[in-house]
Image (cartoon, rainbow, N blue to C red):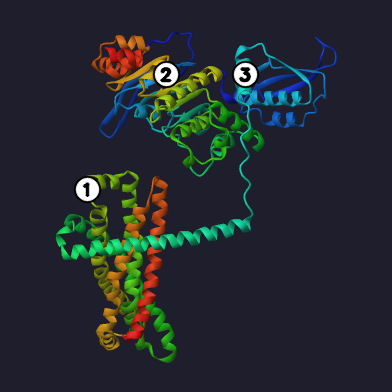
Amino acid sequence: MSAAPEPALDIVIRIRGLRTQFGANVIHDGLDLDVVRGEVMGIVGGSGSGKSVLLRTIIGLNAPTAGRIEIFNQEVTNATDEERRAIQRRVGVLFQDGALFSSLTVAQNIEVPLAEHTSLSPELRSEIADVKINLVGLPLDAANKYPSELSGGMRKRAGLARALALDPEILFLDEPTAGLDPIGATRFDELISELRDALGLTVVMITHDLDSLNAICDRIAVLLDKRIRVGTMQKLMADDHPWLRDYFHGPRARAAMNGPKEVEQG
Amino acid sequence: MTALAADTFTDASFTIASDTDSDAGGWMLKLDGAWITQQIGPVDQKLRALVLPAQGKAIIEIGDVSSLDTAGAWLIHRTELALIDRGVEVDCRSAIPAYARLLETVRANDAHCPEPPEPTNAFVAMVERVGRATVDAAVEARDLINFLGHSVIVLGDSIIRPGRIRFTSLVHHIEQAGLNALPIVGLISFLIGIVLAFQGAEQLSKFGAEIFTVNIVAQGVLREMGVLLTAIILAGRSGSAFTAQIGTMKVREEVDAMRTIGLDPMQILVLPRLWALVICLPLLTFYANLMGLLGGAIMATVTLDLTFFQFVRQLSGAVTLWTFWVGLIKAPVFGFIIGLVGCYEGMRVSGSAESVGRMTTRAVVEAIFLVIVLDALFSILFAVLGV
């Protein structure tokens, strides 16, 4: 089950006994998870194992059937609108394709959360948007472009900039490297790692990318049999659950761990 | 940066002091409170308005700040830059490594994005828009005629070899466009019959010629209203549905997949839809005519004290067989045009889901426009022919 956290750790997300169900289809049953401040937690699992549902449930887009979800020690499933807004201010989400508002430019997209949640002057909002655009490594002229004029990788970066607009403490990422070429994916991993260090973020990311898991995740949560098994990469690799064995010891995993040359020779 | 709830933070603030610790005459900005996005609104205005020293040395002390994020760090950095600009030597003091690192990150990412382009002169923009719209309309007309030609060939081919028509698909579209449209077409025609009868009776009673209300209803419904209303309903119901269906398939590359498998989208997607409307619209028009006359008859019996049989007798004198045919002949042509525009706009969808919506709207507007233009042309034609 979940790794028992040491008592001194600051737990920002605590899930206990989560059950999610659509009709007769049970997605999660008795799921426990703790996310510690400052870590990068990767969520993996087979297709249809409920990774995205879990993410959507944590950020409040899905109501769980049963169980408790606490963010910053605040129960979210029965929070008032006011409490919910307070949590939203401290949480950023990057959806798979950026989910930028298509009628707004990149700079305007980044200013949306600022305009909604703060009373900053338009000049300062625009200055902050400029900083965020730089921070995520977008070229300066991207500021006035519309999402349809950007490449997939740039849309993700712009989405990340919007997710970071309010300087969240927790950042949720849904398959951040999916659809990027290997160079773009590596750069995105590096970016997340840098931002985590510079801004003190806690990152929860769904990913299929073994390179990402290997490179930036401190701990990995695996969705198995409607529950979660948490551990470091080493610990999970030693696990003899059949799915984990296939996942971490398949040819792709070896390539990610060792680099391509050794695989060719082996 | 801390675990406190956001509303427990104190507002960001600063005080100006002369620095007594070191060099005399030094200027010191001492920051206090939480310098985070939620709390820096007021302090931003004060910092902008602040009168900065013109030279010498300045110290920015951020050790007392309770928490800091990129927005707060940006304000500190901006002030720092303004001082440096004036030739002041700045020393930014922070005892906390996390703050220093954040400031460093913001400093490294300071660059101004270009200003959004100025909106062009409204008049110029309008002229430009008119020009573009004209060119677009011309291009669209050419492409539509192109598509018309292609459709006529496919349609003609299917008359010679009816085996080419996908029968299941045809029946499906006849059900969707024809059978399922019966309630709405019937209701609207019935109501229009009532309206015509009521308005006619109102005006004609001034001359004591109420009986001719029947003529108005019969001529109005059979020649124009029946077919026109049915066509407009079908343009809204089925023409738009065709665009949305084919457009969605284009977005998901299903149409491309068809081509690579060797299936012709014209045969599979367009042909059954065209035939369905060409078949359905005359049938629906006939039904609409009956419902319109029924509505007129009911209104006439209520307001004019006519019996139903008197209505029928007057009706048989008021119309000839041609009155009926003039309406009905137009129906398959309108059906063809609605189907054509619906499929054409569907095939023009490219890339995004957004363009499906845009093309659907356009299909409806264009189909209704063309139907009314054609109706006018038919009127001229029939006037020349004398029917």
Query: How far, Cα to Cα, is label 3 from label 1?
Result: 60 Å
**Element at badge 2?**
strand
Mark 3 or mark 1, earlier in chain: 3
x, y percent for residue B5: 56, 22
Figure quadrant of residue B206 = bottom left
x, y percent for residue B95: 66, 11
Q: Which quadrant is home to the N terminus of chain B?
A: top right
Vertical side of A14 occupied by B178: above or below: below
Tag 3 near tag 2, CB within 8 Å:
no
What residue sits right under mark 2 in the picture?
Answer: A41
Q: Chain of mark 1?
A: B
Callouts 3 and 1 on one subunit:
yes
Q: Amino acid at mark 2?
A: Met
- Nearest to viewer (mark 1 / mark 2): 1
Tag 3 near tag 1, CB within 8 Å:
no
Q: Residue at x 44, y 8 (%)?
A: A6
What residue sits right under mark 3 in the picture?
Answer: B104
Is residue A229 shown left or right of residue A92?
left
